[in-house]
Image (spheres, rainbow, N blue to C red):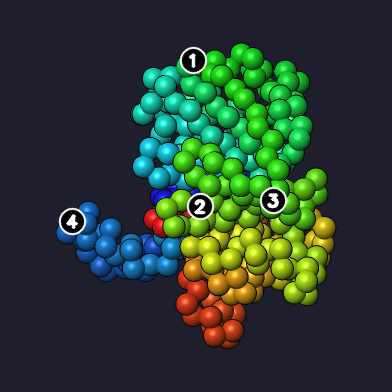
Amino acid sequence: MLITFWGTRGSLPAPLTWQEVEAKLLSILLRVRGRRFPTPQDAQAYLATLPFAERATFGGNTPCVEVRSGDDLLILDAGTGIRALGKALMDGSAGKGQATLHVLLSHTHWDHIMGFPFFEPAYVPGNRIVLYGGHEDLEARIRHQQDPAHFPVSLEDMSADFSFTHLEVERSYRISGFSVELLKQFHPGASYGYRIHRRGRVLVYSTDSEYERTDPDYLSKYTRFFRKADALIFDAQYSPSETVEKQNWGHSSALIGVELALQAQVKRLILFHHDPEADDEKIQSHLEEAISYRDRKEGRDLEILVAYDGMQLQL
């Protein structure tokens, strides 16, 4: 499976401001000082030595993740990142009106669906778009976003063919060549995690989930669902102190992700759904704290990554 992250920010899009871009450039210029770069490749090589948070950005688009195996494709959530994904898909069968696209929604809070009206394949006649989710009124929710009071183009005016499929927990589904299960999570209005299996590889997508208690009985359903996943995409929006301050907001922290990943024998933990208030340095600090906690727990077999817009991961 090839995983591509098109949007990794939670709650609200958070593009860099000009001041933030300028600060990054200034920091790099001060580091360079008397260095010379005879070729662009030399300059690129130097940039690669700098910490990611200083030379780049984790991004500002809200959740959208592409899961691909050969010609088979799943789309996880339809935040603002789906706009760029849609443009990329237009170079293939979606641009010819010959694509069937499967979109699995964790839930329908605005940050997870706000990009859908800008999904270019949805405007191409002949394309078929199937939206899945654990909420029984999924179709009504999507249509409500496309109401003229919220957006000038209704679902009927988009040229693709649409269908909606309600998924139930404790069942396994075959979707676009993938085996898919879902889990109901604690979040205002409920959200659903997805366990995706293909050719011996397992991806778990678990965003917008809060863990009210830490006792084994409460966490057991999660550790079973995450069990031995090759990659776990995990909501790490808050610092540990923020999870206490913002109880019942429906989000978690990197340290809880590490704890659950270790218990479930996960191979890779991917921190996701970054807070719009968190700059790149703060997101980087979440990674460093998670790695430190993992090492104290003697769990060095667990690889920890931070998702960023444009990141790709091969399972």
Mark 3 crowdedness (10 Å alpha carbons): few <14, some 14-19, many ≥20: few
Image location (x, y in percent) of residue 146: 69, 23
Which numbered disc, 3 or 2, marks the residue that appears first in the sequence? 3
| Residue picked out by circle 3 | 170
Give the amino acid type for the residue marked by disc 4 in the picture: Thr
Mark 1 vs mark 2: in front: 2
Pinpoint residue 38: horizontal percent, then vertical percent.
17, 59
Q: CA distance from mark 4 to mark 3?
A: 57 Å
Q: Secondary structure at mark 1?
A: loop
Residue 23: x %, y % from top left: 49, 58
| Residue located at (72% from left, 18% from top) | 148
Residue 39 is tagged as 4
Judge whether 183 appears above or below 155 on screen.
below
Q: Which residue is mark 1?
A: 125
Q: How many marks?
A: 4
In the picture of the structure, the residue carrying the numbered disc 2 is 197
2 or 4: tag closer to the N-terminus: 4
| Mark 2 burial class by Cα count in 10 Å: few <14, some 14-19, many 20+ | some
Q: Amino acid at mark 3?
A: Glu
Q: On the picture, is 236 further left or further right than 218?
A: left
* Foreground label between 3 and 1: 3
Q: Secondary structure at mark 4?
A: loop
Q: Earlier in the sequence, mark 1 or mark 4?
A: 4
SS at mark 3? loop
